[in-house]
Amino acid sequence: MNFQKYNSHISASLSLAVPVMLSQLGHVMMGVVDSLMVGHVGAVPLAASSLANVAFNVILLFGIGVSYAITPFVAAAHGENDARKGSEILKHGLAINIINSVILVAVVMVAKNILYHIDQPEAVVDEAVPYLSIITFSIIPTLIFQTFRQFTEGLSLTRIAMVAVIGSNIIHIPLNYLLIFGGLGIPAMGLVGAGWATLVSRIIMVAGIAFYVYYAPRFEQFRPGFSIGNYSHALLSKMLHIGLPAGAQFIFEVAAFDMSAVMMGWLGAKTLAAHQIAINLATISYMTTSGLAAAATIRVSNELGKKDYATLRTVAFVLLSLAMAIMFLWGILFVGGRNFLPTLYLHDPEVISIASSLLVIAGFFQLSDGVQVVCLGALRGLHDVKIPSFFIFIAYWIIGLPLGYVLAFKLNWGATGIWMGLLIGLTLTATAMVLRFNRMSLRLKQSSN
């Protein structure tokens, strides 16, 4: 009987998670394809794409984190069968994300030349800045897309975003190749071509999902969500109360990885290129479990609304078990394929050697990465975002990064030392999140008895 119960939870969770996994992977594949193709242009353009993403990713992912507030509110409204409330959340989510995206683009464009003042190889920065200038504008379509994505996922309709992202990738891959290497009368643009391909693909992606949500009969009752005006200060405040700390979580974690890329740049262009390869691969594995995190947010929110705290805990720990199983396989792949996987990006022996050593460390932190991302999703389902943000800040910025700096530059461990700091930061974060969720959910369960 218990086996059947757990099997039903696994099935229900995977039906939500798998489309999210695929859409997350599709989103990341734009960056992966950029790196794979640009790597064949040379180590300097590959390092430049890594440096540009230091600035871009932390800003973009802050915006994505803010958009995460939409899903639990929509899931709650859906549980109440209140289409009017769902429409209001969509309308306010669009307003928040459009305004936020414009502000974030302005921040990057004003601050982009800081890259010249962080002790990076000048040749790398010269290629990074034009690329960054182009991809920065893709923040606007990406965050508008996130509005519709989080809205539809809150309704447990996770396949819609998946189709939109896969469709944009089908366009992005040949366009990327054409603009990077040239052809059909178009000159080779190198890294800048990759930037234009990403921007165009993301505009098409948001146009597709917006058109579908507006015109599909199943969403007709939510069409008032496309209106402008009559905004509620109270609802905006509630959404930002969840969204801003969620965005801060991304800043603390992603900026830590971006800071590690800056430190890699201090070790040279080839070390930075090797870091880009390893982080690119680790991002792919992360996105598979981020789908489980989205399922955790949706299912924990639903059970919280029903006040079924025993099922809430069961659902969360089933998802944690799935994440650990998936990440264990990724860890085996990274360690076993450490010498082969970097050759997919380029054929520089020195870069491949450094990337190989980093992939061993990446293999070991897969379990921690999977556990922490699913726990964060479950805690968002409980509307708990502030304390987890504080834990992430301590784990990475007070412990992990400083330790990585000491190992790399004081003890001369080089790139391996920086990644050991990341491993420790991830492990501390995962431990703190598990303890936090277990304590909160157990308290809820006991209070209901």
Image: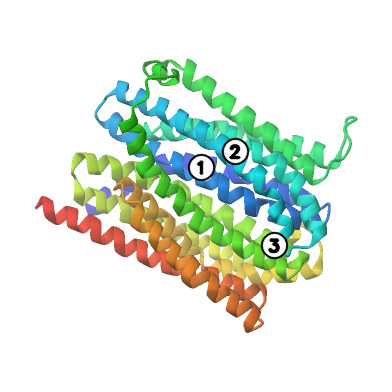
Q: Which marked residue is nearer to the observer: mark 2 or mark 3?
A: 3
Q: Which residue bears the numbered disc 3?
A: 118
Q: Amino acid at mark 1?
A: Gly
Report x, y in % for residue 346.
Answer: 79, 58
Report x, y in % for residue 396.
Answer: 49, 66
CB under 8 Å between discs 3 and 1: no
Q: Amino acid at mark 2?
A: Ile
Helix, strand or loop at label 3? It is loop
Q: Amino acid at mark 3?
A: Ile
Marks 2/3: CA distance? Answer: 24 Å
- Answer above or below: position of 158 versus 54: above
Q: Residues within 10 Å of mark 2 (few under 14, many from 20)?
A: many
User: Which of the two residues, 232 or 63, is positioned nearer the viewer here?
Assistant: 232
User: Which of the two residues, 13 or 270, is positioned nearer the viewer here?
Assistant: 270
Report x, y in % for residue 281.
Answer: 62, 57
Q: Is residue 253 left or right of residue 220?
A: right
Helix, strand or loop at label 2? It is helix
Q: Residue at x 60, y 38 (%)?
A: 139
Q: Residues within 10 Å of mark 1 (few under 14, many from 20)?
A: many
Q: Is residue 171 left or right of residue 236?
A: right
Q: Which residue bears the numbered disc 2?
A: 139
Q: Is residue 182 left or right of residue 235?
A: right
Marks 2/1: CA distance? Answer: 8 Å
Residue 63, numbered circle: 1
Going from N to C along the chain, the mark reached first, 3 or 1, is 1
Q: Residue at x 39, y 54 (%)?
A: 376
Report x, y in % for residue 443.
Answer: 18, 57
Q: Residue at x 28, y 34 (%)?
A: 76
